[in-house]
């Protein structure tokens, strides 16, 4: 996997309900690959929607060409 940072405009905004499915997939893929978060709990959604959370944000990258999200790449263990 490349460590190159895609070129584009990064926007940080408050997370919306319609972001949750993509966020869940990303948390699950990260947990499988890197074992983070260490304590995922019952589900990715319970991790993302913790009752004690004050707020949540997402980052969006606008690029001239499509960027493959880490959660859509095949998982490979080395």
Image (cartoon, rainbow, N blue to C red):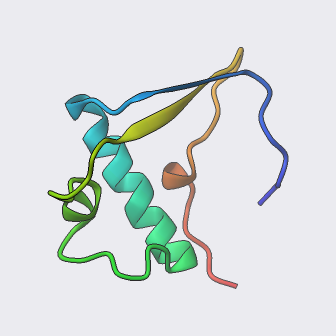
* Numbered label tally: 0
Residue at point 57%, 55% (across, down) = 73
Q: Which residue does the image show at 63% across and 26% down from the upper left?
A: 66
Q: Position of residue 74 (x, y in %)?
A: 55, 62
- Where's residue 28, x and y in %? 38, 65
Residue 57 at what x, y percent from top left?
41, 37
Q: Residue at x 77, y 34 (%)?
A: 6
In the rendered image, the vertical position of residue 19 relative to residue 35, given as above or below: above
Asked which quadrant contains residue 60, the reply is top right
9 in relation to 73, above or below: above
Query: 69 or 37, which lies in front?
Result: 37
Q: Nearer the viewer, residue 53 or 46?
A: 53
| Res 61 quadrant in image | top right
62 over 29 or under it: above or below: above
Quadrant of residue 17 in the image? top left
Foreground residue among 16 and 74: 16
Question: Does residue 3 appear left or right of residue 15 in this picture?
Answer: right
Left or right of 56, for residue 45: left
At x 82% / y 55%, what residue is drawn? Answer: 2
Query: Which quadrant does the C terminus fall into?
Result: bottom right
Specify the quadrant that holds the N terminus: bottom right
Which residue is situated farthest in the top direction here? 64
């Amino acid at each position: 996997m490349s460590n190159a940072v895609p070129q584009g405009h990064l926007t940080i905004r408050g997370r919306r309900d319609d972001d949750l499915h993509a966020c869940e997939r990303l948390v699950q893929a990260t947990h499988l690959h890197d074992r983070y978060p260490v304590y995922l709990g019952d589900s990715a959604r319970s991790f993302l929607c913790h009752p004690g959370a004050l707020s949540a944000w997402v980052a969006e990258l606008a690029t001239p060409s499509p960027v493959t999200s880490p959660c859509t790449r095949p998982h490979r263990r080395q």
